[in-house]
Amino acid sequence: MQRPRPPALVNLVWAIALLVVGACQRDELPPPEELLFAASDLPGHWTAEPEGPHTPTGQAPLGGGPGAIGASIVLFHHPAGDGTAGAHEEILLFRSERDAQEEFQDSLPTAFNDRPDWRWVEAGAALAVAPNASESSFRCTEGRSEAMCRLLARYGRYLVDLKVDLVGTNSELEPVSVMSVDDLMGLILILDDRMAFAVPEE
């Protein structure tokens, strides 16, 4: 007949089991598509493109990213007085933080590529814009009539790319404001909180 285990040993076994389960659960990060914005998150008259969240291709802003184990992008459109304005959010999930760090650094020159007639400029301290990010860069265009801003931020193993037109053009090719800087800052704070909640604390 098997002798009953001492209560202390039983408790120890349960504690170890709970730690193992907890560690497994912490490693199961939400897939990128669950963290993307919906059109209702954007202030104003924005709508998501018909394809909705989808896996990016080689033509997507970050191209899916080498080493990514998950990637999703959503494109938005603003009518801008029968003209056009756009925005996108792309989120990639990598196998390791090192892979995400490398992709963040590799993506900076592509994401903020200056043009002959306009350039990207730092638009404030990145830490203040996205305080929960592991590392980030926030820049807006200078010299471009259709002003836009972009945030590239890493949250642990996630890499987030958010680009928004602040000014679009109407059907007469005149500039039309579609999002204020204050509204964009509010949107980024929503993103920052959402990503911080998704990433387990160290």
Image: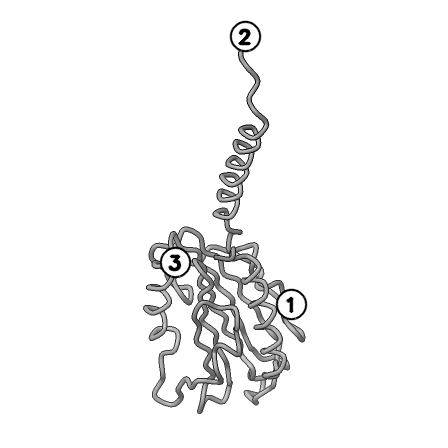
Is 44 displayed left or right of 140 in the figure? right
For label 3, count other residues whose C-alpha is less than 10 Å away and answer few (under 14), some (14-19) or many (20+): some
Q: Tell me the element at label 1.
A: helix
Q: Tell me the element at label 2.
A: loop
Residue under label 2, please give it. Answer: 1
What type is the residue that disc 1 sits on? Answer: Asp
What type is the residue that disc 2 sits on? Answer: Met
Q: Position of residue 201 (x, y in %)?
A: 51, 57
Residue under label 1, please give it. Answer: 41
Residue 92 occupies quadrant: bottom left
N-terminal label among 3 and 1: 1
Identify the image's colour scheme: rainbow, by chain, secondary structure or one colour: one colour
For label 2, count other residues whose C-alpha is less than 10 Å away and answer few (under 14), some (14-19) or many (20+): few
Q: Tell me the element at label 3.
A: helix
Q: Position of residue 179 (x, y in %)?
A: 61, 81
Q: Please give the name of the residue rendered at 56% of the width and 24% of the height, measured from the top-left corner.
A: 6
Residue 126, placed above or below residue 68 = below
Viewer-side residue, 114 vs 26? 26
For label 1, count other residues whose C-alpha is less than 10 Å away and answer few (under 14), some (14-19) or many (20+): few
N-terminal label among 1 and 2: 2
